[in-house]
Image (cartoon, rainbow, N blue to C red):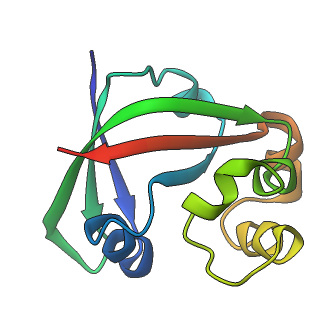
């Protein structure tokens, strides 16, 4: 089992900390392709790198696109509130280019706090 470090914006950090979000959404790039069920992720808050949450990966959900992921049953655990799948997918454009999304696809990292 591996130990991975990642950064999170304030809102998703808080949602995970409060138990309101249990699927973190990322590009399925080289770094994320190495993740395995059972690995530990330490999420650091981007606004305060002294705050962190440790989680364990319980499942990995791979999709060709963020929109596909957000149309799946996992969407309700992703922390997008009242948004629909298309709106949530548009939000991901802030983080990843369309080219990156087409090249790598999307990953839903299902987690539990430890």
**What residue appears at the point 17 percent right and 61 percent down from the top-left corner?**
52
In the picture, residue 75 is in which quadrant?
bottom right
The structure residue drawn at horizontal position 78% and vertical position 48%, both measured from the top left corner, is 72
| Quadrant (top left/top right/bottom left/bottom right) for the N terminus | top left
Instruction: Please state the total of marks drawn on the protein image.
Output: 0
**9 or 78, which is in the foreground?**
78
Q: Residue furthest top?
A: 1
**Which of 91 and 37 lies nearest the eye of the viewer?**
37
Quarter assignment of residue 20? bottom left
* Image: 77 above or below 49: above
Assign the C terminus to one quadrant of the image: top left
- On the image, the x and y values in percent for residue 30 come to 59, 27
| Image location of residue 31, percent across then percent down | 51, 31
In the drawing, does residue 82 fall left or right of residue 67? left
Asked which quadrant contains residue 89, the reply is: bottom right
Determine whether 91 is above or below 71 in the image: below
- Where in the figure is residue 106, as x and y percent of width and height? 72, 43
Q: Is residue 91 left or right of residue 102?
A: left
Location of residue 56 in the rendering, given as x and y in whole percent from the top left corner: 29, 36
Residue pushed farthest left?
50
The residue positioned 39% from the left and 43% from the top of the image is 111
Q: Residue at x 39, y 65 (%)?
A: 8
């Amino acid at each position: 089992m591996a130990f991975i470090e990642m950064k999170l914006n304030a809102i998703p950090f808080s949602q995970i900390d409060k138990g309101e979000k249990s699927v973190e959404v990322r590009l399925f790039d080289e770094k994320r392709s190495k993740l395995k069920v059972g690995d530990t992720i330490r999420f650091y808050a981007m606004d305060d790198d002294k705050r962190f949450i440790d989680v364990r990966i319980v499942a990995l959900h791979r999709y060709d696109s963020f929109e596909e992921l957000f149309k799946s049953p996992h969407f309700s655990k992703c922390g997008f509130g009242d948004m629909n799948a298309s709106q949530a997918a548009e939000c991901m454009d802030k983080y990843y280019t369309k080219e990156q999304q087409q090249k790598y696809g999307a990953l839903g990292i299902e987690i539990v706090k430890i």
